[in-house]
Image: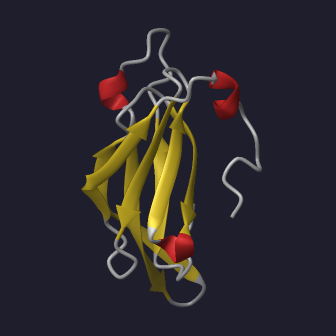
Amino acid sequence: VISPNGNYVYASNRDVSKNPNPSRSSISVFAVTEDPPNSFSLTLVQKVSSLGNYPRYFQLLNGGSDLVLVNQLDNTFVSYEVNPVDGLIDTNSAVISKPKSPALLQPSYTLFQQ
């Protein structure tokens, strides 16, 4: 996912082994630097736990000030606040919920539409 200002890229990290380890599930934040002419470089600036197992679907909302994600293997939904100026995820802002119906977390490209 690319931040609205184009300065940050967010990527999910998942353990794809036969028995995924939740401690390896995270979101990485990369700063984007333009390297003229017409190229860009990424620098890792933060890596935070997804607070679940296998972060699959995530999106920035509210102009990039919120990041929401779904952990596929344990059916958890996590919401973080994001500082839109420096792109960093506020790990103290995490809200975790587990819907009663796992169907709410099934793959859907419209899951997080605003």
> Who's the residue at 66% across and 53% down the image?
112
As displayed, is residue 14 above or below residue 26? Answer: above
Q: Position of residue 54 (x, y in %)?
A: 48, 29
Q: Quadrant of residue 81?
A: bottom left
Q: Is residue 15 left or right of residue 5?
A: left
Q: Quadrant of the N terminus?
A: bottom right
- On the question of residue 3 being in view, the answer is no
* Residue pictured at 37% horizontal, 46% vertical: 95
Q: Position of residue 60 (x, y in %)?
A: 54, 63
Give the vertical position of 27 relative to 103 (above or below): below
* Residue 27 falls left or right of residue 98: left
Q: Position of residue 36 (x, y in %)?
A: 51, 90
For residue 84, what is the image quadrant? bottom left
Q: Pinpoint residue 48: horizontal percent, then vertical percent.
A: 30, 47
Tell me if residue 20 comes above or below residue 112 in the rendering.
Answer: above
Where on the picture, by quarter, is residue 89? bottom left
Rendered residue at 40%/48% (across/down):
27
